Image (spheres, grey):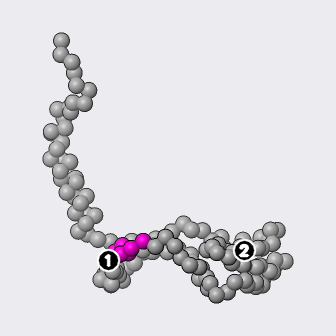
Amino acid sequence: MCKTNPHSVSSARPLLSSFYALASTLKWFLSNVLLQPCDTEYPSFIYEPSVKETNSIIKCGRCQMFVVQQIPESNLLMLVVQGDCDCSRQYPPITLVPKEVKHNASVKCDRMRSQKVRRRPESCHSYHPQ
């Protein structure tokens, strides 16, 4: 009695090999030849490191004050606000979920021409004096 090989390939695979070759060629063609810009939009905030502490007033019902302070020797900020403040009707929530930006045909061509190829930095810096 012969022992069967559990890792053997079935006979149906060679019949479909031309289909797999065509499908993989088509997938490669669509991903490498027909390039599409993929722009995403994120909310961003600009931080000025020379400002160590600031506060301001928000006009939102009873809530008015907030304070932002830099934590020394780090890249962290401490933000203090009133906990009972609900400004969701006046200001939408800020999420970090990317939002895809759709372009029309003319902008898409300009975007593809102006996009620069990204390259890695020449060296790695694990220390920053600030």
Residue 69 relative to residue 64: left or right: left
Compared to 73, does 4 lie above or below? above
Along the viewing direction, whichever of 121 and 130 lies nearer the viewer: 130
Q: Main secondary structure of the magenta part?
A: loop
Compared to 16, does 54 lie above or below? below
Percent across and percent down for residue 26 are 22, 58
Percent across and percent down for residue 46 are 59, 82
119 part of magenta stretch: yes
Q: Which residues are magenta?
A: 118-124
Q: Which residue is mark 2?
A: 79
Residue 109 relative to residue 8: left or right: right
Instruction: Name the residue at the bottom extreme.
Output: 50
Can residue 93 be seen here? The reply is yes
Instruction: Name the residue at the right extreme.
Output: 62
Residue 84 relative to residue 6: left or right: right
Q: Which residue is mark 1?
A: 117
- At x 18%, y 12%, the residue is 1
Can residue 91 be seen here? The reply is no
- At x 64%, y 75%, the residue is 73
- At x 21%, y 33%, the residue is 9
Residue 47: assigned label: none
Splitting the image into 4 quarters, where does residue 87 fall?
bottom right
32 part of magenta stretch: no
Upstream in the sequence, badge 1 or badge 2?
A: 2
Splitting the image into 4 quarters, where does residue 96 fall?
bottom right
Residue 76 relative to residue 108: left or right: right
Along the viewing direction, whichever of 49 and 66 lies nearer the viewer: 49
Q: Amino acid at mark 1?
A: Val
Q: Amino acid at mark 2?
A: Leu
Q: Secondary structure at mark 2?
A: strand
